[in-house]
Image: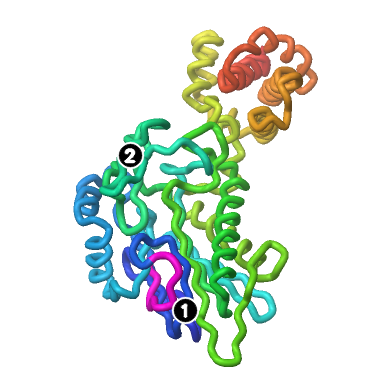
Amino acid sequence: MLLEETDHYALHRQGRYLVVGFARPHRVLGTCRVNGGMSETLTHLANHQSCEGVAHLARYETVLGLGAQDYHARTCAEAGLPPETTALMGTAANMQCAVVARADAEDLRVTVVATAGVTGNAVRAGDPAAWHEEADGSRPARRGRSAESSGQIGSEGPIAGDRPSDDSGSGTIVTLVLINRPCTPACLLRAATMVTEAKSTALLDLRMPSLQSPCLATGTGTDQLAVAAPLAREAEWERHWAGGHNTLGELLGRATHDAVTRCLLLQNGIVPELRRTICAALGRFGCDEAALRVCAESELEAPDAAVFAANLQAIIHDPHSAAAAYGLAEILDLVRTGVLHAGVAREAILNQAALLAAGVAVQPERFVALRAELAPHQGLPDGRLAALAVVRGFARKWD
């Protein structure tokens, strides 16, 4: 299927493949392991689904056994692409969930073709790594999380030594970026940083959690991108900058943010309205649905705990309670980063937990009483204190 055609390129989707074929020479900056880096000789960019997102171990082992070069050659042959001049990216995301987003201003046009998923591989920059690359492949790092919990399929398939998780590939953000005017190599590099920033803001706007730490995610462990602009012809000049203060940078940011946000809806069912829950706010601190059920069973009489569990979805989706939960999450983040110092942290956390309890109780006037009730439990881990606030609030709603 032809998705877009211009004087510079044609974008097609065919089954598991998205392909950009250049109609004139382009300068491309890409992260691909084969034909990556800066190039002026590529004829095609491609993204493809290399495996299913969950438990596709047979396919994974087949891909792993081929190695990067052979996998690249075989996949290009399947798609009818020249392997010598194709930059190929891979993911477990469905190409039918790809989004084409555009942004225009004056003589500039930016097109971003993205696939995105974050449910199995979301990380924050600087999180502990599971893998360490060596000359003959990758091995589990000697520190950080278990490699079994976070091995993922990256560009052109897996890296030697990786092992897939149960949600392998459900977390990869791939962005193909097409700029309609010539750009210097430095400009393409700045464009890549702008695209990365915009991808991160899309995740931060949705308050997506890292799966490697209690922090908010800025991407996934296997993100890939390619940025392309036509080579200058006679009488054409090259753009030199793509920062946040000029038009090109703005367009890159807008189109990338829009594409990634839409992809997360199509691939993972993630939409802002469905992030409005207590657990979406506090799950990364340990206050998830399972923790809430356990807390209710220990705090409430059996019949009341059963009522709590039966109505848990309504409880966690309450807008005012969710607002209080996000307020508590923000306080915990600010304490972690040192913006709020230890002298105020304890009281601020208690105050916000009491506000959460009052929200669940639908009785804001009981804030002071609930604060006093929660005060003896300040020594609990943050997630457990939050869960206790929710359960105590529910109990006070009906007493």
Measured in 3D between alpha carbons, the distance from the residue under mark 2 to the one under mark 1, in whole angstroms, is 38 Å
* Residue under the image location 64 percent in, 18 percent down: 389
Regarding residue 77, the answer to whether it shows in the image is: yes
Residue position marked by numbered label 1 in the rendering: 26
Three-letter amino acid code at the position of disc 2: Asp
Residue position marked by numbered label 2 in the rendering: 166
Q: Quadrant of the N terminus?
A: bottom left
Front residue of this view, candidates 5 and 341? 341
Residue 327 vertical placement versus 192 (above, below): above
Query: On the image, which quarter does residue 254 sit in?
Result: bottom right
- Among the two numbered marks 2 and 1 on one chain, the one whose residue lies closer to the N terminus: 1
Left/right of residue 172 with respect to residue 237 in the rendered view = left
Work out which residue is located at the far front of the displayed protein and give it.
135
* Residue under the image location 45 percent in, 85 percent down: 24
Circle 2 crowding by C-alpha within 10 Å: few under 14, some 14–19, many from 20: some
Three-letter amino acid code at the position of disc 1: His
Circle 1 crowding by C-alpha within 10 Å: few under 14, some 14–19, many from 20: many
In the rendered structure, does residue 337 fall within the stretch colored magenta?
A: no
SS at badge 1: strand
Left/right of residue 134 with respect to residue 108 in the rendered view = left
State which region is magenta.
Answer: 36-46
Camera-nearest label, 2 or 1: 1
